[in-house]
C-alpha cells in the first residue's frame, strides 16, 4: 500500500470561540489514548492531526479513529517532498495504484505553504498533465469527477490523497460535561449513550436491577453492554451504578393498580436517577425513550413520568424510529447483546393493559400507598458501582447470586 499517513480533520472549530483550546486539548488526549499501543507516530497541528503509519496495519488505525468523537473526517495520504518531480511521481504512483478502470478525473491544489514557487493552478496543471500523460485510464472531467487527486502543500511537505472519509463527527467526549445514562439491557439505551458521547457528554450509567425477580443474566447483559460502549469513552472505561430495585419493584407490584405500575416504576427511576446524578456531578439524565414506542413513551405518559423532576432529561432517540436505532445498534456492536432474551424490571410482570394516558393526580394518589421516600433513599445509599473498561472481563453469572451480593465480591477481588 502506497499510503504512509492518515490526515485527520477536526470538527468545526470556528464555532467554539474561547472554548477552542478546551476542545482541542480533549481531542488530542483522546487521539493519544485511542491510538495507544499502535506503532504509529502522532503529529499535532493547529487544526489537523497527522498519523504516521510506519508499519502499522492501516485498518487497525482506522478502526480506532472511528471511535473518536470530534473528528470530522480523515484521508489516507502519501507524504512527499515539495520537489516538483517528486510530487509528480508520487501522484502518478498513487493513481496507478487506485485506478483500475477508466475514470473521470480532476486535480486540486491547496497551497497553505506560500513559499512554494508555483501557484496552485500552475501546480495543478503540471501534476495533472504528467499524471494524464502516463495513466491512460484517467480522463479529465472537472465538473463530475469520479476521482479527485488532492495536493496539499504545508510546512515544506506535499500531502497527496484521493479520498475523504467521514468520521464519527460531533464533539470530543467529555467536553460538554457529564451525564447519567439510564441503561437497560434493551436496544435503545446503549444507542442513546453512544449519541450522548458523540455530542461530547461523558457518561456514567445507572441500572435498576431487580434480582432475583429478574435473572442475573439480565444484569450481566448490562455489564456487557457497558463494555461495548466503553470503547467510545475517555480512557475506554465507564462507571456503572447498579441500583438495588427489588424492594421498590415488589412494593409496586403489591400496592399499585396494574395499569399504573410501569408509570409509577418510571417515576421512581427518575427520582433515583436525579439523586444519583447530583451526587455524581452529572448535569443531565440521558435515556433511550422514543415517542410512541411503548405505553410509557406516549407524550401523555412522558408528561406524567417527567413531572417528578426538573432535572434536564436528554432523549437522543426521541424521534428515531426503531429501524434507525437498530441500524446504529448494529454499527456500534450492541445489537446481538441487546436482543438476548433476558428480562429486566421493565419486562417482567408487565401489565396486560398499561395506561397510555396516565394522569399526574392519579399517579400521586397511588404513590401515597407506600413509603417510597425511604425506599428510594435506601436504594441510592446501597448502590453498587463498578468501573467497566472495554477490555474488562466481569462475569456476574459465575457467582449465581443476587447482583448486590456479587458486585462487592468483584470489587474485593479487584482490589
Ligand atoms: P430499551 O431498549 O433501552 O430498554 P425500551 O424501548 O425497552 O428501551 P423502556 O423499557 O420503557 O423502553 O425504557 C425506556 C428507557 O428507560 C430505556 O431506554 C432506558 O433508558 C430506561 N430504562 C428502562 N429500564 C431500565 C433499567 N432497568 N435500568 C435503567 N434504565 C432503564
Ligand atoms: Mg427496555
Image (cartoon, helix red, strand yellow):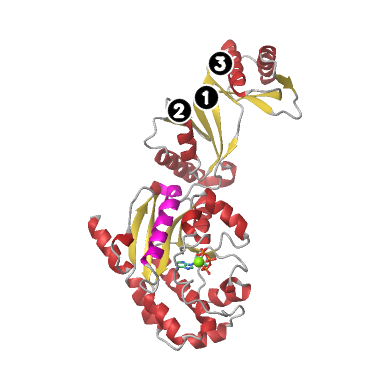
Q: Is residue 382 above or below residue 45?
A: below
Q: Is residue 113 left or right of residue 145?
A: left
- Give the mark nearer the N terminus: 3 vs 2: 2
Which residue occupies the extreme front position in the image?
Answer: 341
Q: Is residue 37 left or right of residue 182?
A: left
Mark 1–mark 2 distance (CA, rounded to whole Å) = 8 Å
The image quadrant that residue 104 belongs to is top right
Residue beneath the point at 59% across and 83% down: 359
Confirm or reject: label 2 Cβ below 8 Å from ligand 1.
no
Give the number of the disc on residue 53.
Answer: 2
Q: Which residue is mark 3?
A: 82
State yes or no: discs 1 and 2 in contact (Cβ < 8 Å).
yes
Q: Position of residue 385 (x, y in %)?
A: 33, 62
Q: Which residue is mark 1?
A: 3
Crowding around mark 1 (Cα neighbors within 10 Å: few <14, some 14 to 19, many 20+) is some
Residue beneath the point at 36% across and 76% down: 377
Confirm or reject: label 3 Cβ below 8 Å from ligand 1.
no
Give the number of the disc on residue 325.
Answer: none
94 within the magenta span: no
Crowding around mark 2 (Cα neighbors within 10 Å: few <14, some 14 to 19, many 20+) is some
State yes or no: discs 1 and 3 in contact (Cβ < 8 Å).
no
In the image shown, does 302 or 325 lie closer to the viewer? 325
Amino acid at each position: 500500500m502506497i499510503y504512509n499517513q492518515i490526515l485527520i480533520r477536526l470538527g468545526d472549530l470556528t464555532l467554539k470561540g474561547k472554548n477552542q483550546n478546551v476542545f482541542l486539548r480533549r481531542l488530542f488526549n483522546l487521539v493519544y489514548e485511542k491510538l495507544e499501543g499502535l506503532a504509529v507516530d502522532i503529529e499535532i497541528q493547529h487544526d489537523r492531526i497527522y498519523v504516521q503509519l510506519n508499519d502499522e496495519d492501516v485498518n487497525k488505525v482506522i478502526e480506532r479513529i472511528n471511535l473518536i468523537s470530534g473528528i470530522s473526517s480523515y484521508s489516507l495520504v502519501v507524504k512527499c517532498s515539495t520537489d516538483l518531480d517528486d510530487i509528480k511521481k508520487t501522484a502518478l504512483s498513487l493513481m496507478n495504484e487506485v485506478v483500475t478502470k477508466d475514470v473521470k478525473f480532476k486535480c486540486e491544489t491547496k497551497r497553505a505553504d506560500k513559499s512554494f514557487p508555483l501557484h496552485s493552478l500552475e501546480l495543478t496543471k503540471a501534476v495533472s498533465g504528467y499524471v494524464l500523460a502516463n495513466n491512460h485510464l484517467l480522463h479529465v472531467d472537472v465538473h463530475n469527477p469520479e476521482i479527485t487527486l488532492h495536493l496539499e502543500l504545508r510546512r515544506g511537505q506535499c500531502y497527496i490523497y484521493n479520498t475523504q472519509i467521514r468520521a464519527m463527527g460531533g464533539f470530543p467526549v467529555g467536553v460538554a460535561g457529564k451525564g447519567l445514562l439510564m441503561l437497560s439491557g434493551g436496544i435503545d439505551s446503549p444507542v442513546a449513550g453512544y449519541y450522548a458521547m458523540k455530542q461530547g457528554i461523558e457518561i456514567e450509567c445507572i441500572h435498576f436491577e431487580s434480582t432475583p425477580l429478574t435473572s442475573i443474566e439480565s444484569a450481566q447483559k448490562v455489564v456487557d453492554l457497558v463494555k461495548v460502549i466503553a470503547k467510545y469513552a475517555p480512557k475506554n472505561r465507564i462507571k456503572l451504578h447498579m441500583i438495588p430495585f427489588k424492594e421498590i419493584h415488589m412494593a409496586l407490584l403489591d400496592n399499585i393498580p396494574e395499569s399504573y405500575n410501569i408509570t409509577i416504576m418510571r417515576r421512581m427511576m427518575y427520582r433515583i436517577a436525579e439523586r444519583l446524578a447530583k451526587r455524581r456531578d452529572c448535569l443531565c439524565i440521558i435515556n433511550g425513550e422514543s415517542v410512541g414506542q411503548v405505553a410509557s413513551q406516549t407524550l401523555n405518559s412522558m408528561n406524567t413520568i417527567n413531572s417528578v423532576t426538573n432535572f434536564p432529561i436528554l432523549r437522543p432517540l426521541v424521534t428515531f424510529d426503531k429501524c434507525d436505532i437498530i441500524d446504529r445498534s448494529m454499527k456500534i456492536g450492541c445489537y446481538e447483546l441487546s436482543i438476548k432474551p433476558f428480562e429486566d424490571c421493565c419486562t417482567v410482570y408487565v401489565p396486560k393493559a398499561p395506561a397510555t394516558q396516565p394522569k399526574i393526580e392519579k399517579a400521586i394518589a397511588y404513590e401515597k400507598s407506600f413509603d417510597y421516600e425511604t425506599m428510594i433513599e435506601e436504594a441510592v445509599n446501597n448502590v453498587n458501582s463498578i468501573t467497566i473498561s472495554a477490555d474488562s472481563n466481569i462475569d456476574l453469572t459465575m457467582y449465581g447470586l443476587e447482583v448486590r451480593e456479587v458486585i462487592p465480591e468483584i470489587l474485593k477481588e479487584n482490589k
